[in-house]
Amino acid sequence: MIFDTDVLIWVQRANKKAANLINKTDERKISIQTYMELMQCPQSKRQQQIVGSFLSDYAFEILPFTENIGHRASIYIEEYSLATGIRTGDAIIAATAIENNLILATSNKKHFKNIKDLRISHFVP
């Protein structure tokens, strides 16, 4: 399973449902986009270290940005941004999920719901 940034933020806010979802998932993956989003939020180097430790402790695999992911994400922006409000980051995350044949865990179903071939596990906090 690949996790959207919002699910990991819920864990950092001590949401037990989000923590349980991660704990019961054997193979935890995130896109490089999610990694960058998480690492830009801390206000200090110590907070960045805490985020890095969280990702390491839970053995998240960070999936790289590839040419195919970039191409697919650009198509999603053209096709869905006006209808759903999907932004670049979400398009990259969706493309990463599809390119790696993974289910996307997210609480932000609205931006992703119209993307063909994207399998979503809707997380409700």
Image (cartoon, rainbow, N blue to C red):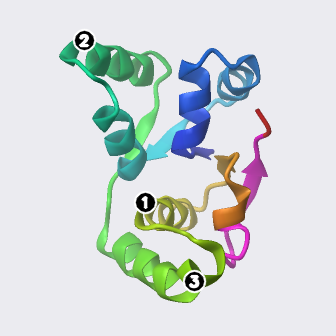
Magenta segment, prevailing SS (helix, strand or loop): loop
Q: Which amino acid does label 1 sit on?
A: Gly
In whole angstroms, how far apart are the C-alphas of marks 1 and 3?
Answer: 15 Å
In the image, 16 versus 20, the foreground residue is 16
Which residue carries the number 3 mark?
Answer: 82
In whole angstroms, how far apart are the C-alphas of marks 2 and 3?
Answer: 39 Å
Residue 75, image x and y in percent?
47, 85
- Residue found at x 32% / y 60%: 65
The image's mark for residue 14 is: none
Residue 120 on the magenta segment: yes
Q: What residue type is labelled 3?
A: Leu
Q: Which mark is in front, 1 or 3?
A: 3
Q: How crowded is mark 2: few (under 14 residues within 10 Å), some or many (20 or more)?
A: few
From the image, which quarter does the C terminus lie in? top right
In whole angstroms, how far apart are the C-alphas of marks 2 and 1?
Answer: 25 Å
Label 2–label 3 contact, CB within 8 A: no
Q: Which amino acid does label 2 sit on?
A: Arg
Q: How crowded is mark 3: few (under 14 residues within 10 Å), some or many (20 or more)?
A: few
From the image, which quarter does the N terminus lie in? top right
Magenta-tinted stretch: 112-123
- Residue found at x 69% / y 20%: 15
- Residue found at x 47% / y 43%: 30
Residue 66, image x and y in percent?
31, 66
> What kind of element bears circle 2?
helix
